[in-house]
Amino acid sequence: MTDSAKTLHTEHMVINMGPSHPVTHGTVKFTVTLDGETVHDLKVDIGYLHRGFEKMCENGTWEQVMPYTDRLNYVSPLINNVGYALAVEKLFGVETPARCQYIRVIACEMARICDHFTNIAAGAMEVGAMTVFLYFVEARDLLWDLMEELCGARVTANYVRIGGLKNDLPEGFGAKTAKAFETCRELWTDVDKLLTKNRIFIDRMRDVGTMPAEEAMAYGFTGPCLRASGVPYDVRKAHPYLVYDQLDFEIPVGETGDNFDRYLVRMEEIQQSMRIVEQALAQLPAGPINLDVPGLRWQSKDDTYNRIEALIFHFKTITEGIQPPAGEIYAAVEGANGELGFYLVSDGSGKPVKCRVRPPSFPMTAAMPRMMRGRLIADIVPTFDMINMIGGECDR
Amino acid sequence: MIADLTETIVKILFIFSINVGFYAPILGWVERKQSALMQDRVGANRASIFNFRIIGLFHPIADAVKVLTKEDFIPDGADKFFHTLAPFLSLTPAIVTFAVIPFGGSYELWGHPVQLVIADLDVGMLFIFAFASISTYGVVLGGWSSNNNWSLLGGLRASAQMLSYEVAMGLTLIGVFMVYGSLRLTEIGAIQENFFRWGIFMQPLGFVLFLTCAIAENKRAPFDQPEAESELVAGYFTEYSSMKFVMFWMGEFLEIVTISGIVTTLFFGAWHLPFVSDRMLLSLFAGAGPNGAAVLAMLVNVAVFFGKVSFFIWLMMTIRWTLPRFRYDQVMRLGWKMLLPLALLNIFITGIVLLV
């Protein structure tokens, strides 16, 4: 048998996985060279969701960029909003009022929970556990209901403003959040029972897509995937922004950097994010949510209609846009997938000269060939889910 | 002669209508509703006739109309003959194998002995194996003839998986045959009149092994690698549409019924209620006269048998919607390195127990 196997003429099979394939959500194409079921080589083809985000930003005012950021990582748009707003505020050299910062933290963490719910749900569904998918989608829906109350939209939030927020927390938000979290925790426990000790699930995830810490850092991994490799880097702790330094939460860290650790890190981060939201709601200070800087943040409608100065500022900021001082800035927040950075260049005019995004999922997508070479075709499924490539933010 | 012929035709019609007419369409509905129940959803309930919805029971009809009116598509470069043949090879064995499964005992009706099985073969179980192997061809041919890489991969996976698990399944059953001393399913069923002689007590390990192999043989989650929708799009039936697709689909559901029937017959007391012997059942209905009692006992037995079958169908559906899918190499490892040695061990233990 061995002799014939050596002399038998075989050819590798090249197969196009995607761009329209069940596993390539986010629209990406893998050109997989297969030796039987084993992946001999894998090429990643991104760009199917390129919409020219950065170019679009250059053609609008600084404020008009905000809705575009919703469409980066569309699973956690609020973090993108906050990241962009923080970057522009850094360019201006201003800081928002305390209440605004707390509400931004609440919004960010809710978005992070939604993102992790979606990610684990999709991952479980792809390895065949459809029930888990629907449990977590139900949990996510509860949070989306809260977001709908908060900003009127479920997916494309467009909630944060430069120098403030669109609106304050709605009435009874804290109580509703507590109630939603209760159900979320129940569903979390259900999923934990269904997956974490499930032998089939462990077999599918353990030692698949492993990335040692050094290599992960060399590729530029951030977020849950880097922490799964054992590096406790989290922008919220390493470079605290908003009021994260005043909140008590932990950064879960994995050991091996395989898919199972990525799953565990995300599961624990859901719990930690819920803790953060609860603390932030408890500590929420009173006060304004918007900066009172007329050239930066719109004045209230009341003022605009009744005071001539406010009307002038309104007119100027609408027609010319707010005008940050010339310069360049890089500001990063901890997105659901990792470090979400905004590099902004201003020439002092009302439009950004450059608005570059550092997408957290890009380095992870780039590492797909490294992680998949020599593995089975079925391993692409959980790995690609766990790196959580989001077309909107990777391709922009 | 005429009576025998009539009897056979009636039995065939009965089994055919139960399987193809009842189970195949209703299982699609059951699967939807069962999964919905497990997933906190409502499930299919939109199909209506004159605004009557009756919990979505019209969906099988709507589905049937839909698939019959869809285009029957054969991809470019596909082997038309084999592409068309494959679904038939997949569906036919699933229907035929039920012929040797007894769905009731033997009764004397108006002086005519009636045995509730279509074909009482003395090689009953081997017949089932022989036909189950044919359905492998259906899957492999479907995958190969579609001229699609995903289908090909699915077909290859299916052939490897089904062949491997057939080995383990066959070896598991040897223990059962050693205990009962027969391959004839009616005989095995009759022995289980005694509750303590049920296969699940005589062969507990064999039961677990057989059920596992049976699900794998059936290509249902967690063993659905051949279709693994997230990896292989839909596996071997990616390129099938219309009625041919439904034939694969019906084949799968009917295999569930057949396998539940086999498990019931071999391990779960066939048509018997626990602690109720045939004689007790007949004396219970003695008031209805000898013929009436026989008919009533027959109805009870048939109901018990299909009740048990439905239980196993439910069990398989629950497993299907609870567990994730294995990876292909893990399935093979489980089959050859776990189930096969355990099946051999089972034979060994059974042999020792029988000798001592």
Image (spheres, grey):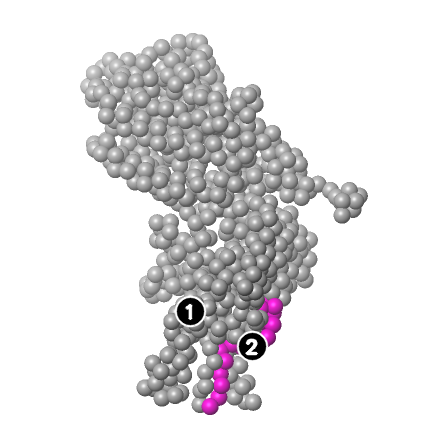
Residue A391, percent from left and from top: 50, 32
Query: In the orientation shown, which residue stands out farthest toward the top?
Result: A326
Task: Look at the numbered discs 2 and 1 and tell me whether their residues touch, using CB distance below 8 Å.
Answer: no
Q: Amino acid at mark 2?
A: Asp
**Where are the magenta residues, as a range?**
B111-128
Neighbour class for label 2 at 10 Å: few (<14), some, many (≥20)? Answer: some
Q: Position of residue A279 (x, y in %)?
A: 27, 25
Work out whether A241 lies above or below B101: above
Q: Evaluate whether residue B3 shows in this view.
A: yes
Q: Nearer the viewer, residue B106 or B221?
A: B106
Q: Which mark is residue B120?
A: 2
Q: Residue at x 44, y 87 (%)?
A: B109
Q: Amino acid at mark 1?
A: Phe
> Where on the picture, by quarter, is residue A245?
top left
Q: Nearer the viewer, residue A386 or A91?
A: A386
- Helix, strand or loop at label 2? It is loop
Of the residues tagged 2 and 1, which is closer to the observer? Answer: 1
Q: From this view, report whether residue A318 is shown above or below residue A130.
A: above
Question: For residue B195, which numbered disc appears in the image?
Answer: 1
Residue A358 locus on image (x, y percent) = 48, 22
